[in-house]
Amino acid sequence: MTEIVNLSNIYKSFGAVQALIDFNLSINEGEIVGLMGDNGAGKSTLLKILAGNFLPTSGNINFNGEDVVFNNPKDARKAGVEVVYQDLALCDHLTAAKNIYLSREAKRFGFLLDHKKMNETSQKLLDELNSSARPGDVVTGMSGGQRQAIAIARTRLSEPKIVLMDEPTAAVSVAQVPVILDYIRSLKKQNHSVLLISHRLPDIMEVCDRIAVMRLGEKVCDKNKSDCSPEEITGLITGAIKSA
Amino acid sequence: MDLMELFTGPRKGAVADPRVARLRMYLNNLAVFFLVCAMWITLSLVTSTFATTGNITNVLRQSSLWSIIAIGQTVVLITAGIDLSIGSVVGLSSCIVALMLNKGYPISVSCVFTCLCGLGVGAVHAFGITKGKLPPFIMTLAGLTTWFGVGLLITGAMPIGNLPADFKNFSRGDVLGIPNLFLCVIGVMIPTYIILNHTRLGNHLYSIGSNRPGAELNAVPVTRTIFFAYMYSSLLASIVGILVAARLSLGIASNGFTWELQAVASSVIGGTSLFGAVGGVFGPVLGATVLSTINNGANLLNVQPYWQRILTGVIIVAVVFFDQLKKRGK
């Protein structure tokens, strides 16, 4: 199996705070890795390093066989990293379509926006996610599920190598959770890798191939799903079990 | 369509209807348009001097100058910034162009150089805001005093007159009865409209005003976009500086004094939000027409001109107060 991401000896500190300590993780092509941990364990920091928002203090990122430095989100996106952020990073005043296409707007004549194409493609992507959001609507006032769908639809604009998702099921209605989990499985079918950050153990157990647990900036577990039990994972998250 | 949305904005938790949102913007502009009409009709009835060709042209000339800077201000306000240096940049630009014309440079060279200076001024503001991480308010407030000082310095605080006739005639001229100054407004409105509504740059301007950290996460080139906003605003202020120098046949640093507030007031009367991401090109032009009508009407009615400044202050507070109510979710 081809290795898509290999993080080795990643450290990240913010002033005196050590957010990541000697972190190692490898993700293969078409693999869904669940990343769990309590608040402040360093999950979002790790995601932001992979997404190009932060540079690691030290350590190496190997992406698709090459050592890379992601200086900004654009670098990461270019390499094939798509992200669904926890706060979704939506612009409330823009329409759903303009949010989906933000910073890669479709153009015609080289400089004018292609509103028609953006709306049509957005409609298609939102339909695939069973979302009732309409491409021409501004995001202000949309429900949590509709917002989530827009943030997820963004990842469909390119053929990403890996999709990073930060709590994609936290703010949606119960009925929408299976839709999002189905979407994650469909990514795997198309051979995209997924790094799924979640607090919801049932979601992780349902879709992930492998589970990694972080505690206080360190990885305390990295096992195939079949090798771990929910009790063990919970214990690792809370610190009742030190490592596995 | 929920008609209450027109007045209150979408209810909390309800999906905003884009048709209503668009209609609200049109209605705001329409209301301001009717306000202008009402003021014009009233002034025509109560004064004998308002509805004369000379006076109307005068109102339009004044509103043209304010419209142009208000459009520049709007572009900056859309990014949730503010440009308080506009008045001083108008003054400085009128000095630069007058000095160059006095030295015998051709009109074209003088105007182009003045515009380049304007772009430079905007770049300085944007540099401070993006690289120096200074609040736009502070950076451009410093610009307000700095550029006024530079204008005084290069002219020795003296008015620079004696400008070539061709230059002066431009501001009084017309094409097929349409004043040249108004043509300048159209010449600014069209590209600005296209930029805001039909280019990636426009989408990025709104996205930064709406959610700057989110725009950054989505790889929007935030720094470049903010440079554009402030450079565009200063460029338009420079153009107005040139037009003012032509209109008054005078370059002096106090040209455009406090016009940054006229620009803010015109823009917010025209529906621009001081909190970013809301605004267009028609609103500021209408807003500028309201202000220049008030100005002109006050003169004709023999009201002391100082009232106009007081009124501008009251209008800014009132409009922003209501804008804030809307933002707070009613």
Image (spheres, coloured by chain):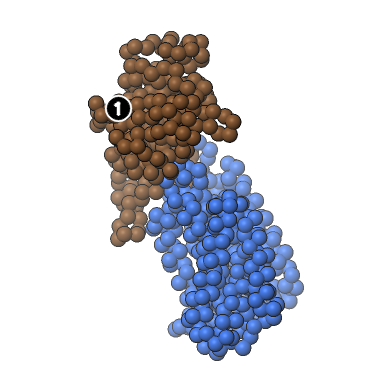
Evaluate whether residue B212 shows in this view. Answer: yes
**Nearest the eye: A96 or A192:** A192
Specify few, some or many for label 1: CA neighbours under 10 Å numbering under 14, 14-19, or 20 or more. Answer: many
Q: How many marks?
A: 1
Pick the front one: B74 or A19: A19
Chain label for disc 1: A
Which chain is displayed in brown in the rendered image?
Answer: A
Q: Please name whichever residue, A165 or B48, is drawn nearer the observer in this view of the structure.
A: A165
Residue B211 is situated, as x and y percent measured from the top left of the image, at 50, 45
Secondary structure type for disc 1? strand
- Measured from the top left, where is residue B197 in percent x and y? 42, 57
Q: Quadrant of the C terminus of chain B?
A: top right
Tell me which residue sits at (35%, 34%) in the image: A62
In the rendering, what colour is chain B? blue
Residue visible at 34% across and 59% down in the picture? A111
The picture quadrant where one finds residue A173 is top left
**Which percent across, then down, holds residue B323?**
60, 50
Compared with B91, B130 (above or below) is above
Residue B87 position, x and y percent, is 63, 68
Q: Residue at x 72, y 64 (%)?
A: B310
Above or below, A205 relative to B286: above
Q: Quadrant of the N terminus of chain B?
A: top left
Residue occupying the point 35% across, 29% down: A6
- Evaluate whether residue A147 shows in this view: no
Q: Judge left or right: residue A227 versus residue A213.
A: left
Mark 1 lies on residue: A28
The amino acid at mark 1 is Asn
Q: Is residue B169 above or below residue A73?
A: below
> Which image quadrant for residue B270?
bottom right
